[in-house]
Amino acid sequence: MLEEAIHDLPVRHLVMSASHNITQKPQRQVDEGIIASAEKYRSRGDMVSYKFQRVAGAQIDELKFLMPLWKDVPLLAHQVISAITHDLTVSVVGSKDVGLVVGAIQDYFKLNDRRLRFVDEGQQTSLANSLTRGRDALDLSDNHFFYFVPLDLPFFFRLRPMLDDEDAAHHIAVVDVNARERIFTGAGELFPRNYYWDLITSNGDGEVTYSIKEPNPIGFSGSIAFDRFFRTIDHMYAHRQGGDFGIDALIQHITRNMVQHPVQALRSISSGGARQLNDLYAWWKQGKRLTLHAEQLEQLGYFLQMAPIRIKAEHQDPFRLKDVDAWHDLFDYALVIRYNGGLQGIHAHATLIEGFQRPMESLKKEIPLLRNFPAYANERARQLGMPLPYGKHQQLIAQPSCGTDIPGTVALLRKFSSTYHSHGNA
């Protein structure tokens, strides 16, 4: 750890994203790709996944963050409501329909624009776009640190460990990846995910190897120069769900910084950065499973901004791992709520979320995706060759995805919620 802090703690700023890319491909071609990808996973014995995809010009925008999880309350509201219970300044990036929901949250909880701000996603949707627009709306100074949080983690309500993370005080970026062995320590997996890479990191007993997925919340310094940095991240992140990332953009960015900062470059190379860069390049050319070295990645990461970056596998919250990227993710969470008989006892802010149902009953009429979501979900299921998720009376009849432990998930959520209230937002 560095001797002097460069940021204030705890972190008090969040950029929350309810935006993701829109493809220009025709719907039929998009659906063929979704089906082919699901079949590829099935043939390998991996978790089968029918992904969501926004399509330009579609009659209904398939924006997952607006999909209802409990009654008419959309995914994004679960996390935004959790965030505003903390002393935080929050910006939410999304579509005009997302803006309607954020406005309803502001009205319902009597919040002003300083505490909760909506930022239109604009025309060029991307990770970099959401980061930049959301960050600019917060008016951060250099000594401020913020977290970028995707709004498809409805049961990620234990924010305090993230906000109090001491690494945020000493680094300009903090990447705490999802590590299978850390999250499901000493217990069976509650739900399957596809882990694409291995990460080697050091502890007091030597080196440890984890099977990892990309991180969900990522921390950034307010001092970061966003233009080139985020364009590089955007390119690297574009194909993360298949275990790929834009290594060519990373190499180009690092090369530029090596030329501009030769002294720091030599220091990084001597500390193992060159070995990791070589491993990345070999993996890129050969298509093998990639093994990452945390310390060497931090040396490479230094070149992204010429400042210290922290890469680790520490958090143990399954609900930072289980996001809603595909239809089965949404239905699994809905089945958890149904098994529990509602949100009480499994979500720390159940009463507040339930109270938001009243404004959503009227607001949903203004949002095409929410006007008759069961009918939309069934139509998409027909198009993708999935079993129909809703019955003739609009009741959920979807089955849990293979390997998902609904009772175990409910039990852990009950434990987390109880601990949250008894130990002060733990």
Image (cartoon, helix red, strand yellow):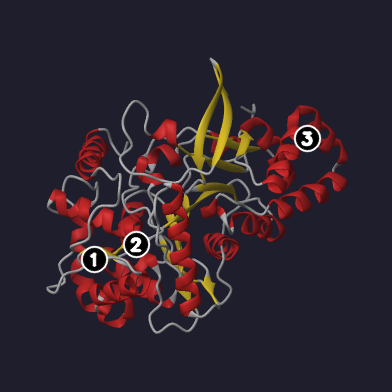
Marks 1 and 3, how far apart in space? 50 Å
Residue position marked by numbered label 3 in the rendering: 274
Could you tell me if the residues under marks 1 and 3 are in contact, i.e. CB atoms within 8 Å?
no
| In the foreground, 249 or 1 | 249
Residue position marked by numbered label 2 in the rendering: 327
For badge 2, the amino acid type reads Trp
What secondary structure is found at the residue carrying circle 3? helix
The furthest residue to the top: 205
The furthest residue to the front: 43
Q: Position of residue 125 (x, y in %)?
A: 55, 70
For badge 3, the amino acid type reads Ala
Side of 208 relative to 62 (left or right)? right
Q: Residues within 10 Å of mark 3 (few under 14, many from 20)?
A: some
Q: Is residue 97 visible?
A: yes
Q: Residue at x 75, y 33 (%)?
A: 275
Could you tell me if the residues under marks 1 and 2 are in contact, i.e. CB atoms within 8 Å?
yes
For badge 1, the amino acid type reads Pro
Q: Residue at x 60, y 44 (%)?
A: 173
Q: Is residue 16 visible?
A: no
Quarter holding residue 38: bottom left
Which one is closest to the eye, mark 1 or mark 3? 1
Q: Position of residue 403 (x, y in %)?
A: 30, 44
Residue position marked by numbered label 1 in the rendering: 389
Marks 1 and 2, how far apart in space? 9 Å
Mark before the other along the chain sequence, 2 or 3: 3
